[in-house]
Amino acid sequence: MVMQKFRAAAASNRSTLCIGLDPDLARLPEHLTRDAAGIVQFNQAIIEATSDLVCAYKPNIAFYEALGSAGWQALKQTIASIPGHLPIILDAKRGDIGSTAKAYASAAFDELGVDAITLSPYMGYDSLQPFLERADKTCFILCRTSNPGGDDVQNLALANGEPLFLKIAELVAERWNGNQNCGLVVGATYPSEIATIHQRYPELPLLVPGVGSQGGDIGAVLAAAGEQAIINLSRSVLYASSTSSFAEAARDVAQRFLAPKQALNHP
Ligand SMILES: O=C(O)c1cc(=O)[nH]c(=O)n1[C@@H]1O[C@H](COP(=O)(O)O)[C@@H](O)[C@H]1O
């Protein structure tokens, strides 16, 4: 089961940090070429500098798709550069009718060979089924996202007065997690909601973006969900410096987020 891969990586690196590999051509260090080759060089240096500090990497497919077929190749080369014991979460936020979802699942799990994916629950169970039935893979389902506009839908009140995002958490925990391969995406910008979700469903792993560039506080996330929170950092680590020592600067930032109180309490 893939969750064991996350737990093993977290235990051996004493870290629940995840680095988001979101390469923005405009922000690459000046000495790198602003193309797919530059992205591969950039990602490889970041991975090399941080692979002992993380429990996972999360490439966001948008940054690769934006470069067309060269971007797809860059994504595959990036995936191949990640040490095999570290899980890879493809951030793709998929969710569509079953036949299309089946193709999306095959692209992620068979063609790219990633361990986990982010999914949107908006279209319901059948849109997620091709992912959920892959018991060897992990599905992180959007629940309470980090962006301000998330309120527009996720905070709508149900007949019982509770916000919609809590119903999503319930559906995942009680109906969609038959293979014990589900987690939720919850934004670091809403720590009290993280706490509520974690109290109700302590068994669900939480993927938590929004620390760093979006202003979320890592201490508040840890207080809310402890070791169940896989905490993602993208821009704050990737673009710590635009000089040729960008990878060392990225490592320094990741280490700063990994203060001793934040490390996992493993022997
Ligand atoms: O699914 C995600 O990872 C995600 C969900 C969410 O609610 N908010 C969010 O920021 N993300 C992603 O997490 C990353 C956050 O990047 P930084 O804000 O640069 O750390 C981006 O790849 C976002 O697409």
Image (cartoon, helix red, strand yellow):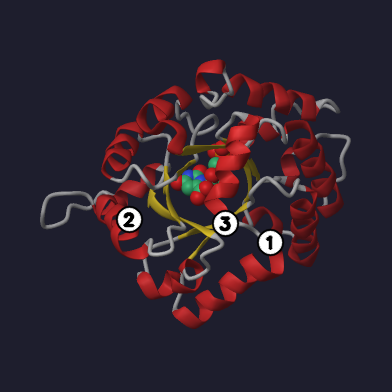
Kindly tell me whether residue 134 is visible in this rendering: yes
Disc 1 is placed on an element classified as helix
Residue 25: x %, y % from top left: 75, 46
Q: CA distance from mark 3 to mark 1?
A: 18 Å
Query: Which mark, by number, is residue 204?
Result: none
Residues at marks 3 and 1 touching, judged by CB atoms closer than 8 Å: no
Residue 143: x %, y % from top left: 37, 51
Residues at marks 3 and 2 touching, judged by CB atoms closer than 8 Å: no
Decide which of tag 3 and tag 2 comes sooner along the chain: 3
For the point 34% across and 42% down, which residue is it?
Answer: 202
Q: Nearer the viewer, mark 3 or mark 1?
A: 3
101 left or right of 58?
Answer: left
Query: Which mark, by number, is residue 173?
Result: 2
Q: Residues within 10 Å of mark 2 (few under 14, many from 20)?
A: many
Decide which of tag 1 and tag 2 comes sooner along the chain: 1
Decide which of tag 3 and tag 1 comes sooner along the chain: 1
For the point 78% across and 28% down, which residue is it?
Answer: 246
Kindly tell me whether residue 18 is visible in this rendering: no
Amino acid tagged 2: Ala
- The residue to which callout 1 is attached is 65
Disc 2 is placed on an element classified as helix
Disc 3 is placed on an element classified as strand
Q: Residues within 10 Å of mark 3 (few under 14, many from 20)?
A: many
In terms of image quadrants, where is residue 47?
Answer: top right
Task: Please say if 41 is above or below 251.
Answer: below
Is the residue at mark 1 in contact range of ligand 1, meaning its CB lies under 8 Å from it? no
Residue 193: x %, y % from top left: 30, 38
- The residue to which callout 3 is attached is 116
Amino acid tagged 3: Ala
Task: Please say if 94 is above or below 228.
Answer: below
